[in-house]
């Protein structure tokens, strides 16, 4: 199995054994792997430690037990290996912001979530640390024509907004136009989740309607990451990958208006292979790249 399949299988294994003691050693042994390598692989792929993930899934499983109202909180705590009801209650409140008793009384309702998907991407090993594979490269100056809008990635419908604007652009261009497409995020204020976005293609278009622009994206030194699958479903995984990359590679974020560039192979398919370009400072050691 490749690393994606290993983690996908591990998530299923964990879900099937939440009522049993689970450790890095026991899960790694199920896949005939070193606990040290498995721990690094799991953390790199899922963005959290194995123990953190197991805790979150046990709390998730407790939601169904609580809302069925056929077991006491003490029984649920012991069944899910929390040891005591008090430790279960503390962990539950940390994760959900309410006590489990509020679900028992019906004051609050929280729906369980399915096993998370594994975002598929290549990885590399740097001095024993596992990080999402990256290439230090220049994003060359490119003229991009498209539609500009704002999006708040904290909103549940931000993906639908991007898709809707992409369809607005595609409805304005000749169907024979093919090739790459870009989603460029810029000017996010510190602590904000609102971005200015340009969805476009690398050509000059003249569309006489509001919010359609042609801009020259400057040459930018970047770390490029490769992902496979749904363009808009990487969410917190990208933040985790990028933070891990900065820590392990000892690179620094560049001060630029452009926050992120998503470049995908086919403008007509947002589920194609795509690259993420994240601007970083060009250090002396990178000058020959």
Image (cartoon, helix red, strand yellow):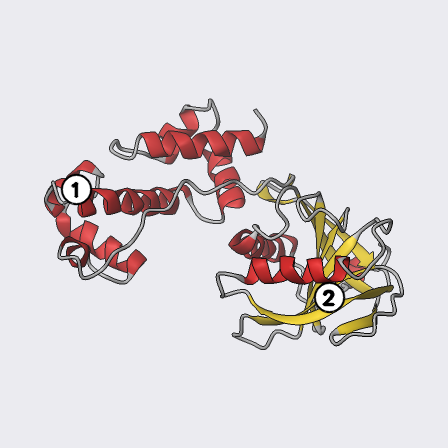
Closer to the camera in the image, 41 or 249: 41
Residues at discs 1 and 2 in contact (Cβ within 8 Å): no
- Callout 2: few (<14), some (14-19), or many (20+) C-alpha neighbours within 10 Å? some
- The quadrant the N terminus occupies is top right
Q: Give x and y (percent) for residue 251.
A: 67, 60
Position above or below: 255 against 43: below
Q: Is residue 220 left or right of residue 262?
A: right
Q: Give x and y (percent) for residue 136.
A: 76, 53
Q: Residue at x 26, y 31 (%)?
A: 20
Identify the secondary structure beneath mark 2: loop
The image's mark for residue 281 is 2
- The quadrant the C terminus occupies is bottom right
Residue of label 1: 76
Q: Give x and y (percent) for residue 238.
A: 58, 54
Identify the secondary structure beneath mark 1: helix
Q: Disc 1 to disc 2, how far (Cα)?
A: 50 Å
- Callout 1: few (<14), some (14-19), or many (20+) C-alpha neighbours within 10 Å? many
Q: Residue at x 86, y 51 (%)?
A: 177
Q: Give x and y (percent) for residue 206.
A: 87, 69
Q: Is residue 16 left or right of residue 1?
A: left
Residue 278 in view (yes/no): no
Residue 220 in view (yes/no): yes
Q: Is residue 111 left or right of residue 280?
A: left
Closer to the camera in the image, 73 or 90: 73
Q: Residue at x 49, y 34 (%)?
A: 7
């Amino acid at each position: 199995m490749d690393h994606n399949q290993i983690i996908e299988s591990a998530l299923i294994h964990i879900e099937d054994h939440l009522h049993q003691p689970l450790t890095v050693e026991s899960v790694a042994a199920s896949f005939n792997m070193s606990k040290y390598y498995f721990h690094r692989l799991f953390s790199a792929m899922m963005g959290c430690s194995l123990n953190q993930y197991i805790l979150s899934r046990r709390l998730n499983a407790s939601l169904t037990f609580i809302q069925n109202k056929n077991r006491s909180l003490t029984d649920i705590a012991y069944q899910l290996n929390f040891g005591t009801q008090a430790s279960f209650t503390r962990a539950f409140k940390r994760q959900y912001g309410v006590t489990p008793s509020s679900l028992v009384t019906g004051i609050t309702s929280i729906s369980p979530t399915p096993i998370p998907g594994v975002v598929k991407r290549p990885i590399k090993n740097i001095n024993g640390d596992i990080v999402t594979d990256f290439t230090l490269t220049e994003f060359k100056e490119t003229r991009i024509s498209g539609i500009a809008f704002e999006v708040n990635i904290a909103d549940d419908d931000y993906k639908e907004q991007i898709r809707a604007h992409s369809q607005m652009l595609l409805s304005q261009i000749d169907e024979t136009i093919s090739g790459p497409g870009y989603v460029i995020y810029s000017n996010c204020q510190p602590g904000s989740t609102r971005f200015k976005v340009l969805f476009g293609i690398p050509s000059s278009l003249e569309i006489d309607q509001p919010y359609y622009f042609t801009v020259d994206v400057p040459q930018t030194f970047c770390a490029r990451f490769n992902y496979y699958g749904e363009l808009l479903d990487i969410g917190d995984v990208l933040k985790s990958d990028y933070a891990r990359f900065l820590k392990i590679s000892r690179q620094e974020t560049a001060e630029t208006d452009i926050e992120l560039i998503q470049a995908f192979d086919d403008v007509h398919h947002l589920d194609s292979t795509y690259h993420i370009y994240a601007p970083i400072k060009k250090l002396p050691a990178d000058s020959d790249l």
